[in-house]
Amino acid sequence: MDWFGRRRRSTTSVAAQKVRGPEAAGQPVEMTGTTIFGAENLTSLFSAHGLSDGGVLELDGQLVPEPDNPADSNALAVHVQGVRVGYVPGYLAARAPHKDQALECQVQLWAAATPRGLRVRGWTAVGTGPADWPHNQDIPPAITTQELRAEQAAATSRMIDAALADGGQRAAEIKQGMVGQHHYLETVEPIKQLKREGRLEAALVLCYGAIAAAERDRDGREPAPWYTEQAAIIHRKLGQRAEEEAVLRRWLDSCPPERRSGSRIQQRLDKITHPK
């Protein structure tokens, strides 16, 4: 398999491949930089196709090397109709076999309207033939921030449900981290949402439930620190400095001594106890 998941062939130029006819495209990969480097061009592209409010486009494109890119000399930009719309992920671009010529590719772009304009996610597959896209009209990708949050939360829940269904040691480990009917990993988005809504006391309740579950689940390691950090942030917003310090010390007390120094929890505590 080559760097884009396509079976290797004898080294033939892109032009020669097109003369011989289209072949199946490589494995699609999600592009990066669509919301930063390609935002303006993507908005114009969708508008030109009568999709100012969003939709899906499947177009021919090119993978264009950018050897002078100041951030990454291996950068491989994705161009559609002559303009850059994103990049191939860096770890794949570094393995690209051609560093001095553009490659034909297929591009699938999905857009949704948001208060800040179009938000676009895109996939690209090297080659000129049909691509096995991971999404279609029946299974569209999450695009907006809200959809992405829901997708991540659903993926976490599926993972936990599958582990519990399989039984055995993994299921027993998962049960150690339960907060009522849910695993503490599933409280991340609810905690964030409660904070966004300003319901800080309710968020604290979830934080402390997750902290206790993470302590049970640590198995000799340090507990997952995110929940402690969130509790400390909320206590700070509520002006509860003593409670902020206490929850940080609680994490450190549950943490193996060799893992305390340099941790973000220790750094936060140091700022409280030794302010400059």
Image (tube, rainbow, N blue to C red):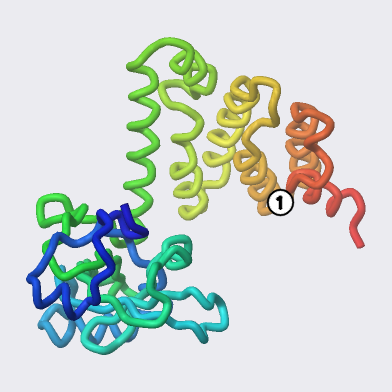
Name the one closer to the observer, 249 or 257.
Answer: 257
The quadrant of the picture occupied by the C terminus is bottom right
Q: Position of residue 103 (x, y in %)?
A: 28, 76
Which residue is at a point 48% across and 55% down the rendered structure image?
196
Name the one closer to the observer, 175 or 87.
Answer: 87
Q: Where is residue 50, by image quadrant?
A: bottom left
Q: Tell whether 24 sits left or right of 28.
A: left
Q: Where is residue 211, by image quadrant?
A: top right
Q: Position of residue 23 (x, y in %)?
A: 13, 63
Q: Position of residue 207 (x, y in %)?
A: 58, 36
- As displayed, is residue 53 above or below residue 218? below
Quick one: SS at disc 1? Answer: helix
Name the one closer to the observer, 81 or 51.
Answer: 81
Amino acid type at mark 1: Arg
Q: Tell whether 78 sits left or right of 231.
A: left
Which residue is situated farthest in the front direction here?
Answer: 10
**Residue 50 in sight in this render:** yes
Q: How many marks?
A: 1
Q: Tell whether 254 sits left or right of 192.
A: right
Which residue is at a point 53% across and 23% down the rendered structure image?
177
Pointer 1: residues within 10 angstroms few (<14), some, or many (20+)?
some
- As displayed, is residue 248 above or below residue 88? above
Which residue is at a point 26% across and 89% down the rendered structure image?
82
- As displayed, is residue 226 above or below residue 128? above
Residue position marked by numbered label 1 in the rendering? 236
